[in-house]
Image (cartoon, coloured by chain):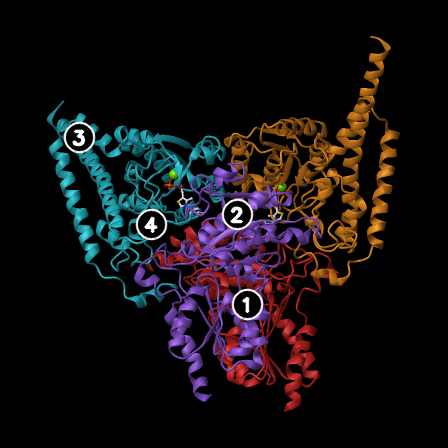
Chain colours: A purple, B red, C orange, D cyan
Amino acid sequence: MREMTFGQAIREALAEEMRRDSRVIIIGEDVAEAGTVFKVLAGLVDEFGPERVIDTPISEAGITGVGVGAAMTGMRPVVDIMFGDFITLAMDQIVNQAAKVHYMSGGKLRVPMVVRTTLGATRRSAAQHSQSLHAWVSHIPGLKVALPSTPADAKGLLTTAIRDDNPVVFYEDKMMYQVKGPVPEGEYVIPFGVADIKRAGTDVTIVATSSMVYVALEAATLLEAAGISAEVVDPRTLYPLDTATLVRSVQKTGRAIVVDEGYMRYGITAEIAAVIADEAFDYLDAPVKRIGAADVPVPFSPVLEDRTVPTAHSVAAAATALCGPASASR
Amino acid sequence: MREMTFGQAIREALAEEMRRDSRVIIIGEDVAEAGTVFKVLAGLVDEFGPERVIDTPISEAGITGVGVGAAMTGMRPVVDIMFGDFITLAMDQIVNQAAKVHYMSGGKLRVPMVVRTTLGATRRSAAQHSQSLHAWVSHIPGLKVALPSTPADAKGLLTTAIRDDNPVVFYEDKMMYQVKGPVPEGEYVIPFGVADIKRAGTDVTIVATSSMVYVALEAATLLEAAGISAEVVDPRTLYPLDTATLVRSVQKTGRAIVVDEGYMRYGITAEIAAVIADEAFDYLDAPVKRIGAADVPVPFSPVLEDRTVPTAHSVAAAATALCGPASASR
Amino acid sequence: MDIGVRKRATAAGRAQRDQWLDVYRRMLLIRIFEEHVNDLYTGGKMPGLAHLYIGEEAVAVGVCHALRRDDYITSTHRGHGHCLAKGASVDRMFAELLGKEPGYCRGKGGSMHIADPDAGNLGANGIVGGSAGIATGAALSAKLRATDQVAVCFFGDGALNQGLLYEVMNMAALWKLPVIYVCEHNVYGEYTHSSETTAGDPKARPAALGIPSGEVDGQDVRAVYAAAGDHVERARHGGGPGFLLCRTYRFRGHHVGDINRPYRAREEEEGWIRDRDPVRILGGWLAQQRLADAAGLEEIEREVRAEVAAGVQFALAAPYPDPSEVAEDVYA
Amino acid sequence: MDIGVRKRATAAGRAQRDQWLDVYRRMLLIRIFEEHVNDLYTGGKMPGLAHLYIGEEAVAVGVCHALRRDDYITSTHRGHGHCLAKGASVDRMFAELLGKEPGYCRGKGGSMHIADPDAGNLGANGIVGGSAGIATGAALSAKLRATDQVAVCFFGDGALNQGLLYEVMNMAALWKLPVIYVCEHNVYGEYTHSSETTAGDPKARPAALGIPSGEVDGQDVRAVYAAAGDHVERARHGGGPGFLLCRTYRFRGHHVGDINRPYRAREEEEGWIRDRDPVRILGGWLAQQRLADAAGLEEIEREVRAEVAAGVQFALAAPYPDPSEVAEDVYA
Ligand SMILES: Cc1ncc(C[n+]2csc(CCOP(=O)(O)OP(=O)(O)O)c2C)c(N)n1
Ligand SMILES: Cc1ncc(C[n+]2csc(CCOP(=O)(O)OP(=O)(O)O)c2C)c(N)n1
Ligand SMILES: [Mg+2]
Ligand SMILES: [Mg+2]
């Protein structure tokens, strides 16, 4: 299969869906000529014109609200919120409007809108450009949340997001745009709520999201050298969450670590750990462990920032600690 | 001890702190003459004047931002966000500004601000006036989060919040304002991060927040009749979270249920359940169970809304199910 | 003047008369509807909150009279009038207010969230100013789909201080979107006078963005209709957004429970109610123009009262939704 | 004229000369500082992003020259100039940009978050428009504490479209707060021309709220100083907020990595750089007024270059914070 970058896969999904469905439009800051600050949308305006790839003022609440209204009246907007940190400005439109319109109207109105935004640190961008705030929207009924880790998943999940009749918040790790991988040609759809086992293993389950999948895979390699066989499971969507696949994996391995780049406290890892601890209760040989961003605003200085993110070594160490005593007892 | 309502206790804490410290001011919509829509602040403007009890335009982001700036420059504002649902509009100011200023400035600036807001459903106020969104702010380093359940706790925790040099988000359940209880006279401070055992018990721990404490206590009474002794633990602050007390209780009872009025998914109950499942792993006789709001936008119709909130019966039923088989095995 | 012309003139006159009688009927419908809401609420039959539109009827009716059925509106917490003016039926409105199954939202929305997309009503909103984005997005959609639909965003004077409004008005101005922002300036936001919360002349705010901005007596439905009509026609033909400030007054409390209203003077209230009642103003004009006599107007009132009473009965008798519906319609 | 008067006149003339030489020095300091930032960045020594202020020096320096040290400012992602103009020292600035321990924020803030409260600088902000609330709140604080401090909020033309700005300007107008909103209109927000994002005349927006609103040539530091001074004096004496639109241009890319700049014409850039360089404009005026000669200005430049070079050396040699500091200062 042909290889392409994560960013190109995003672009391809958008281009294919825009060709297929004239209701699909893109709205955001510097999305047209500039093709976004990450250059992910480069060229789309040339093919689809400024009527469908719309440069906006710097008004995150406003453009999200405009997206909601357009979605309610026959369009399928893809709203671009440059940095996930800026979703703070659009929470009312996402949570009180987009997420609730269908329900509040007794099912009569729909909001087929995608909010594409980013997460992830280590770009030395400091506290307001580095957050992974995907827990907030995952908390809200009415929203769906996807966060692909590979170029193929990016294409498949974004296509699904655009075709979904509900508001979907779609998270891309800024550090992954250059990651390469095989991507199916033509229409490619991945259903929401289906986790993907990125690596099979038997001793410990590492649940990892977005770019943490790479951290987990690297950890798995380290662990393999130490004689521990790790299974890496990528939920791919946080809502709907494929608990069945997660639980099945842990029933097999008896141990689980959850890795996500957001904050641990009241975050993604809490939900997934709680679900596993509950549903795989009788199978667990050890408590479920969680790894996430350090509990601090993201600092600028590289020597500090590097201490805030999960690494293959920290994940491997946690897995070793988890398997150690139990392995010994086997 | 004299009795007063939850609302009166809030008012007393504010009045006492405003007398004690001229830097304390109140900013919000209809806080002055009207004393808020919940009448909680009635009379404060008469004592402290419109310079310190400031009626604002309907501008949640703006008033929060003004609060941050005032807090950075020598004042101690208490910002009133009428409904917790409207915090959606102020997330940038709370999360990207208030929570991070101290850290980003290398410790030089401080934001001693309290955001008082509300949570809780069953007022037939529908989807945009009934949410319990306290999980969001609990997720963010730099913020502290308190949610008292009794009038005395309300006074003690609000006093502490006002004296804290950090931004504190303070949640009051709208349905609790008329709840009465004893409240200490004069200065009364409750340290953050100290859970309170509202009822001692031996068979099951019910961790409950805010008004869910009453639901849990009622459930405990029902359970007592069924021969099950429930311990009700109120964390009182979500950050800092008194995990030691929670874990100690579960080490004793071997079973835990977490009840919070927010959504379960990626919410408060997830964090608390994950912490207990981890730290009390060797003591748990059954998986930790969670109870929260139904996973839907809050509906208007009473017949529907009543189905969305935890009740003493649903909590008691969960506890019975949890204790049943194990009790049998004892 | 030959007979043909006279006939045509008479036909035009009749159409003109029918039009204003219809407008009168609709204003009265809102008035009487709201009086019944008040009674249902104080009688303990309606849960939640009720923000009555009494006194402001000319705004919703005048503006919606200038709209087509397929034009869009967004509404507010004080939204019953907008819904009725845009074509909602009384019985399903009441049913929604009581949380009943045949309500417009199957009881899920209630007073603050009635939506009626069949009539172009994209929904009321419990967030002050919260629908400004939706209305603007609907206008963008109309433009992109190349229909000639227009969107109207109703909001109160309090909503003038929500930043979102300026963000979306800016986009509407830049992109020449067919949206009209209608500010219902009833002088108070909750319990605070607008002079304490709103600096400057509200009309100047959209004007600063290059949006044609006018002001009208919101108690005079014919004036509202004329002013709205200008904005609608311009918007419909590609001329871009408009802003209409309607000076009005809510005759009742912020919500039904707001009884004492210490924040405003009784004389002020009485003055508006006595001199500036939009229903009476139109009724007076109809009489003066000899387009209707007292008996005719009474006949309309009888019909309206019957319609409203039937609506109340319908709603009271209607079933609640099945509790299992609570989990439906979360996702499409 | 007796000798006393002549002496006083000469003293006044000297003070006047010294003032403008000082202003010149400060603008040049920013210019040369930023050139070194560029080099550090392209040389791979500075992590993150660098938004250079080159071309806009007269705005920060002109405004801050009208302020007292205890007055407040809030700054932006393009904030180095504001920091230096308000009194930050070059060495600790560079240290912060390199994430070093002696930096203004101990390396935690970096380019977009430098704060220097000792000099009244409440911090740069990575959220476009994000500091408008902070500046307004600082003004409220000054008013409540009855100091006569003034707060200045610097922001770009792109920030004109963030709703927060209108929410807080409204409050500033209502409460007559001592805050001046200074819009650095450099024509672009990132890669988009302001005409595509900003409807109407920006000055009209605050004017609509009743805020005195003016425009000035942002390349002429004396004009900026005069205009800012008027606003500051009014604000300081209880006259309430002001708004100053400074027409300027960023000579470089949006950030250092913005090399090709396809979104704007080379001629446009060259025209501004050739004709509208604020440092050269003041230098020319100083020479014309015989307040300085070429040698004098060169001497200043030598001193500034030495200061900046020393600052770079200081920062390069400075230690990183201890990694354990990562967990400090989350809570006070
Ligand atoms: C964002 C937000 N803030 C506050 C409220 C509470 N609230 C409900 S109605 C209202 C006053 C609105 O005033 P206005 O816009 O003038 O409308 P009116 O009630 O006068 O029709 C307020 C503050 C709300 N619903 N939403
Ligand atoms: C809320 C928010 N949205 C978007 C961005 C990304 N961004 C950074 S700078 C910038 C352009 C700002 O333009 P302007 O205000 O004119 O300032 P300038 O860069 O021209 O000095 C944008 C969109 C941001 N930092 N914050
Ligand atoms: Mg009003
Ligand atoms: Mg700019």
Seen in the image, is B27 located left or right of residue C222?
A: left
**Which residue extends farthest bottom?**
B330
Q: Quadrant of the N terminus of chain B?
A: bottom right
Circles 2 and 4 on the same chain: no
> Given contact means CB atoms under 8 Å apart, are the residues at marks 2 and 4 in contact?
no
Q: Residues within 10 Å of mark 2 (few under 14, many from 20)?
A: many
Circles 2 and 3 on the same chain: no
Q: Nearer the viewer, mark 4 or mark 3?
A: 4
Q: Amino acid at mark 1?
A: Ile
| Real-space CA distance between mark 2 and mark 4, rounded to the nearest whole angstrom | 28 Å
Residue B87 shows up from this direction: no
User: Which residue is label 1 attached to?
Assistant: B268
Q: Chain of mark 1?
A: B
Q: Secondary structure at mark 1?
A: helix
**Mark 1 lies within 8 Å of ligand 1 (Cβ measured):** no
| Real-space CA distance between mark 1 and mark 3, rounded to the nearest whole angstrom | 68 Å
| Real-space CA distance between mark 1 and mark 4, rounded to the nearest whole angstrom | 36 Å
User: Which residue is label 3 attached to?
Assistant: D13
Q: Quadrant of the C terminus of chain B?
A: bottom right
Q: Secondary structure at mark 2?
A: helix
